[in-house]
Structure formats: C-alpha cells, structure tokens
Image: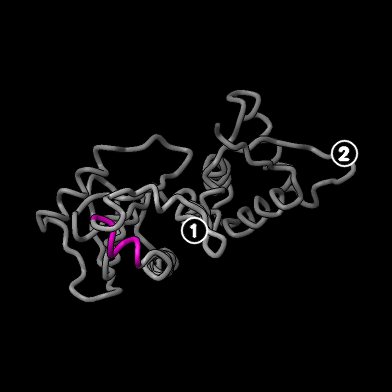
Amino acid sequence: MISFSINFEMVFVIHKQSNQIIFYRKNESFPLNVKLLEKVQNMIQNNQIQKGSSLNEIKQFELENKNGIIWTGKFTLIVLILNQNPSSMEKEMLHTYGIRLESRFSSELQNLYSTFLGNIDIFLQDLPTRPNLKKITDEIFHIDFTYPYTVNLNEDIKPISNIDNEILAFATKKVQEQKYVYLHQIISFFEKNHPLLKLQIQESIYSLINIGFLKKIRKK
C-alpha cells in the first residue's frame, strides 16, 4: 500500500443529481490541482469522459499524462486520479470506497438538495455509529502514507538490515535538507538504485514506520 502514495493524486466525489463536487481528498505531498479537478468534472458533464452505464461499473480514462478511473453509483460518480496505469488493487479500492460511501451516506446523498439544503458539511460530521467521510477516505486510500515524515532514531532499537540503514541515512539527509521527507522520495530513490528489491524496500519502509524510526508529521 505504500507504493500507492507514489501513484495516487486525488479522489473526488461528484453528486450525480447536481454534477457538483461534494468532496475531495488529495495526495498530501503535492499541491491541489484545481484546474485538473474542474476539467475532469466538466468533461464528465459534457460526456467527453465516458462513465459507466450500470451501477458499480468502473471506466478508465487518460488526461494530461494522468490516468483516471470512474466508479458509477446510484447517487454519485467517484473519480480516482493516478500518475500511472491503475492496477486491479486500485480499482478494488475505488469499488470498496464507492459501496461504503453510498451505503453509509445514502440518506444524505438522496436528500442533499432538499432536506439538507445542499450543505456538504454533513459528510464531515462524526456520528456515534459512523465516522465522517474524510476518515473513511483516509482509511481506504491510506492517505497517511502521503504525509511528510521525519526520522526518529531510538538508541535502544537497531535497524535489522543494510537496506534499513540505507533508508534511514537517506531519510535523515532529506530531513536535514528540507525538514521532512516524503515516502515517495524514499521509494523513488531506492527503486531506481535497487530495481530488483522493490518489495523489500517497501517492506523495510513499512517496518521502519511501525517501529517508529519514520514518524509522520501532521500538517496544521
């Protein structure tokens, strides 16, 4: 799932009745691309991007060197923008997200412009029996892996492998240069230098996060 942080750019939800974007979540390591967001919305509205004709159908498209997939639901269209061709994993993530969204917010989606007067803040409200949409999105799309990280060395615990030590040395250098490091910077650097060790590199990064050597920095 860590590799998803390289490929993922944003996910957003379009309300079918109004064609309005009611929610979006982006990769925290990149700025929001508002022009791309609006362009995709307009192209869907004008049928320049094909959407599914049946419920739960997923369609794929390309635009401005980006790849996108669209899930069609009863009340929404959900768009996932990626920097590489979507894999079966990413399609499954989008499908899971769509089903969960429409199941948990069916009343709000159906009555958004009547009972709820178009107030999209209702999707960000926590209920005792249901987390808000941001929390659901962050969980399914692993947004935590797109945040900046810092290095937090613990003298009582030593990294196990040479790869662990190399990753920490690279991350430490980046933190010294820019006060943080993004996981996609680590992955890109080491996959370029160790192309046969992609899975091992990702497993090492995940292990270093779990141990606490790599610690997420929450943006204010």
Q: Is residue 198 magenta?
A: no
Left or right of 171: which side holds 2?
left
**Is 175 drawn above or below residue 100 in the view shown?**
above
Residue tagged by mark 1?
Answer: 136
The residue depicted at 27 percent of the width and 50 percent of the height is 118
> Residue 201's spot in the image, x, y percent?
62, 53
The quarter of the rendered structure image containing the N terminus is bottom right
Q: Residue at x 27, y 46 (%)?
A: 65
Callout 1: helix, strand or loop? helix
The answer to whether residue 5 is above or below residue 148 is below
x, y (%) of residue 89?
Answer: 45, 67
In the rendered image, the vertical position of residue 179 relative to residue 23, given as above or below: above
Numbered range of the magenta stretch? 107-113
Residue 64 percent location from the top left of the image: 23, 45
In front here: 52 or 129? 129
Q: Residue furthest bottom?
A: 54
Q: What residue is shown at x 37% (from left), y 52% (from top)?
A: 11
Q: Which residue is the extreme one toward the front?
A: 115
